[in-house]
Image (tube, grey):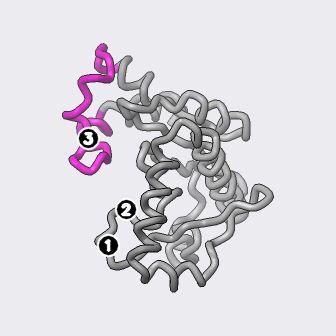
């Protein structure tokens, strides 16, 4: 959306940009194919020297090969689940956030960029939060809000997510008031 100038121009002087981070964003940054039977690939980016670039057009041609898609998907999944790649996953996401903040600040110099981590029962993203905060980006911790508002451990979270892993209306009803309070809105 940040690269679509038409949509970007529709928004006038926002005070905040809030990125809703869910665990699946790790996978999305690592594999161009959510499922092998998808007839298209999602855009991937390469990070060099802390800068984010779209991947080369040659890969788009290679993606037409089922074998290439299979290998990319399997390796992307391995990088997504393996603890060996935890720093790699987190560093990629942080680089994306830095790039997004840079683009936003160019358009809206006074905007405040916030990353809100929605809880996921398998990954509390503590080290990711620390890396994001080290870059000067505000992070709102969804785990803390969830446990504070529900007075329960996060193991009872199924009713707060859609089947595809996205937070549902019930989850947002928990988070929005607390988010507004934390950001003084």
Q: Which residue is mark 2?
A: 34
- Whether residue 57 is situated above or below residue 114 in the rendered picture: below
- In this picture, residue 90 sits left or right of residue 110: left
Cα gap from disc 2 to disc 3, whole angstroms: 19 Å
Determine which of the numbered discs, if any, sits on residue 38 in the image. Answer: 1
For the residues carrying marks 1 and 3, which lies nearer the camera in this image? 1
Where is residue 89 shown, x and y percent of the image?
Answer: 58, 46
Decide which of 150, 25 is in the foreground and name it.
25
Asked which secondary structure carries label 2, the reply is: loop
Q: Residues within 10 Å of mark 2 (few under 14, many from 20)?
A: some
- For the point 63% across and 46% down, the residue is 88
Q: Are marks 2 and 1 in contact (CB under 8 Å)?
A: yes
- For the point 43% across and 31% down, the residue is 142
Magenta residues, start to end: 149-173
Asked which secondary structure carries label 3, the reply is: loop
Q: Earlier in the sequence, mark 2 or mark 3?
A: 2
Cα gap from disc 2 to disc 1, whole angstroms: 7 Å
Q: Earlier in the sequence, mark 1 or mark 3?
A: 1
Residue situated furthest top in the rendering: 151
Where is residue 77 shown, x and y percent of the image?
Answer: 44, 52
Q: Taken as a whole, is the magenta stretch helix, strand or loop?
A: loop
Decide which of 38, 160 is in the foreground and name it.
38
Asked which secondary structure carries label 1, the reply is: loop
| Residue 95 covered by magenta stretch | no
Q: Which residue is mark 3?
A: 161
């Amino acid at each position: 959306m940040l690269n679509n100038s038409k949509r970007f121009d529709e928004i006038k002087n926002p005070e905040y940009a809030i990125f809703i981070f869910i665990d699946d964003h790790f996978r999305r940054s690592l594999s161009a194919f959510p499922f092998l039977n998808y007839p298209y690939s999602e855009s991937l980016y390469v990070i060099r020297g802390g800068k984010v670039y779209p991947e080369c057009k040659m890969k788009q041609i290679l993606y037409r090969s089922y074998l290439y898609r299979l290998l990319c998907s399997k390796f992307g999944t391995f990088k997504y689940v393996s603890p060996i790649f935890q720093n790699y996953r987190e560093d990629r996401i942080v680089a994306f956030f830095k790039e997004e903040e840079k683009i936003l600040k160019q358009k809206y110099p006074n905007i405040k960029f916030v990353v809100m981590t929605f809880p996921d029962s398998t990954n509390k993203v503590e080290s990711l939060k620390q890396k994001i905060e080290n870059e000067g980006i505000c992070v709102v911790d969804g785990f803390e809000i969830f446990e504070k508002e529900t007075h329960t451990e996060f193991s009872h979270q199924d009713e707060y997510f859609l089947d595809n892993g996205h937070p549902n209306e019930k989850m947002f009803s928990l988070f929005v008031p607390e988010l507004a309070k934390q950001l003084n809105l």
